[in-house]
């Protein structure tokens, strides 16, 4: 019987390839997050990771470390892996909120349980329905020319799913960027836009009025997270369906958006929903409601969290809005063999647990000083 002996949590700062536009005036210069290491008495180790996201989950890495050390880890030490089902409700009650901290622990527990059972994590989540997932390329550069150049390079590398960040420039520039990107990726590629809550209703209507021919796959979170009435009005204006992101932090939010007619799909992130088990339940509810599903990481998580998202993506009922992974935006990784997009897709790692091996030296190298 595997019993949890020790839990370590480390705040890390990972270097992005270049500053990343997060919407509005926000730019990511350093990818902050935490790494969790859980060890059993017989020497088995499981790893988890979550990004810090003050503007999304409300958490910073120092707070995530404190939440795990003070409230979550004490409940797990001495616990048996065969009682994880009973432990998870305790973890949820231990501290209000802190979904990203809980997601990091949840992923480490899944990795540990998979390694203990000799099974991949996707099997613990109900089994793999797919083993290759199309990956979305997010475009959020300072200039239209840079967006076009990045889109063209990604298209040539085999990518066929794109999302353009809007709301950081004048409306006419957002429109011009969307048109230019569509022209370079061609009519068959998927293109969506994400305003990250930065638009008001008038701006969104103006964008909808002049982009109806662009065949957008969806329009993500044009208004504030709690403006369901405004979102419902926009749903009647846009030719493309609306996707809720910042507005979805729990199952009840999915029900509220559906009841209001405020969206027809969701971008689901484990760091918002509190873990991978909870995110799978949210994806199942979306499918039951006839909603579209996108699974997404927060910029920029390493191949460790990416592996977790791949196992989740393999197990959910539907993934028609594809997968948004973010490790390829990093200049360095903490996994010995980083996961790489090939011809526009990521392949499910093989082996027990998450199927990737963390390099402890890299965790130490990027530990926040």
Image (cartoon, grey):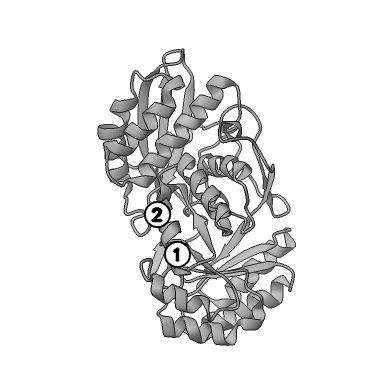
Could you tell me which secondary element the residue under label 1 belongs to? Answer: helix
Could you tell me which secondary element the residue under label 2 belongs to? Answer: helix
State whether residue 213 is above or below residue 251. below
Q: Identify which residue is drawn at 44% across, 58% down.
A: 255
| Residue 270 tag number | none
State whether residue 211 is above or below residue 329. below
Q: Are marks 1 and 2 in contact (CB under 8 Å)?
A: no
Q: Identify which residue is drawn at 59% across, 74% down.
A: 240
Q: Identify which residue is drawn at 64% across, 28% down.
A: 351
Please tell me which residue lies in front, 207 or 261.
261
Q: Position of residue 321 (x, y in %)?
A: 61, 59
Q: Position of residue 102 (x, y in %)?
A: 37, 40
| Residue 259 tag number | 1
How far separated are the C-alphas under marks 1 and 2? Answer: 10 Å
**Residue 31 visible (yes or no):** no
Q: Position of residue 195 (x, y in %)?
A: 47, 71
**Mark 1 vs mark 2: in front:** 1
**How many other residues sit within 10 Å of disc 2, few (<14), some (14-19) or many (≥20)?**
few
Q: In which quadrant is the C terminus drawn?
A: top left
Q: Identify which residue is drawn at 31% across, 47% down.
A: 97
Q: Position of residue 268 (x, y in %)?
A: 49, 53
Please tell me which residue lies in front, 213 or 263.
263
Residue hosting label 2: 252
């Amino acid at each position: 019987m595997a019993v949890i002996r020790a839990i370590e949590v480390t705040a890390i700062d990972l270097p992005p390839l270049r500053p990343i536009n997060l919407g509005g005036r926000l730019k990511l210069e350093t990818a902050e997050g935490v790494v969790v290491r859980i060890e059993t008495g017989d020497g088995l180790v499981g790893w988890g990771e979550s990004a810090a996201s003050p503007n999304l989950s409300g958490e910073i890495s120092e707070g995530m470390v404190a939440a795990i050390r003070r409230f979550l880890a004490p409940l797990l030490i001495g616990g048996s892996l065969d009682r994880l089902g009973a432990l998870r409700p305790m973890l949820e009650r231990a501290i209000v909120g802190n979904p990203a901290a809980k997601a990091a622990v949840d992923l480490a527990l899944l990795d540990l349980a998979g390694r203990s059972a000799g099974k991949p994590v996707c099997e613990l989540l109900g089994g793999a329905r797919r083993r290759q997932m199309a990956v979305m390329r997010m475009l959020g550069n300072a200039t239209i020319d840079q967006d076009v150049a990045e889109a063209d390079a990604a298209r040539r590398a085999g990518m066929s799913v794109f999302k353009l960040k809007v709301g950081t420039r004048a409306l006419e520039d957002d429109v011009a960027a969307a048109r230019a990107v569509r022209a370079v990726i061609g009519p068959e590629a998927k293109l969506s836009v994400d305003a990250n809550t930065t638009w008001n209703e008038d701006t969104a209507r103006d964008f909808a009025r002049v982009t109806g021919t662009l065949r957008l796959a969806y329009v993500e979170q044009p208004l504030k997270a709690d403006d369901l009435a405004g979102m419902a009005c926009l749903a009647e204006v846009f030719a493309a369906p609306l996707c809720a992101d910042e507005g979805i932090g729990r199952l009840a939010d999915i029900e509220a958006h559906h009841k209001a007619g405020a969206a027809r799909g969701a971008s689901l992130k484990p760091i918002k929903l509190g873990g991978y088990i909870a995110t799978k339940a949210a994806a199942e509810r979306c499918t039951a409601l006839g909603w579209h599903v996108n699974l997404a990481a927060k910029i920029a998580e390493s191949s460790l969290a990416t592996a977790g998202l791949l196992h989740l993506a393999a197990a959910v009922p539907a993934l028609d809005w594809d997968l948004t992974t973010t490790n390829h935006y990093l200049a360095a990784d903490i996994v010995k063999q980083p996961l790489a997009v090939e011809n526009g897709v990521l392949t499910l790692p093989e082996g027990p647990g998450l199927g990737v091996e963390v390099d402890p030296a890299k965790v130490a190298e990027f530990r926040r000083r």
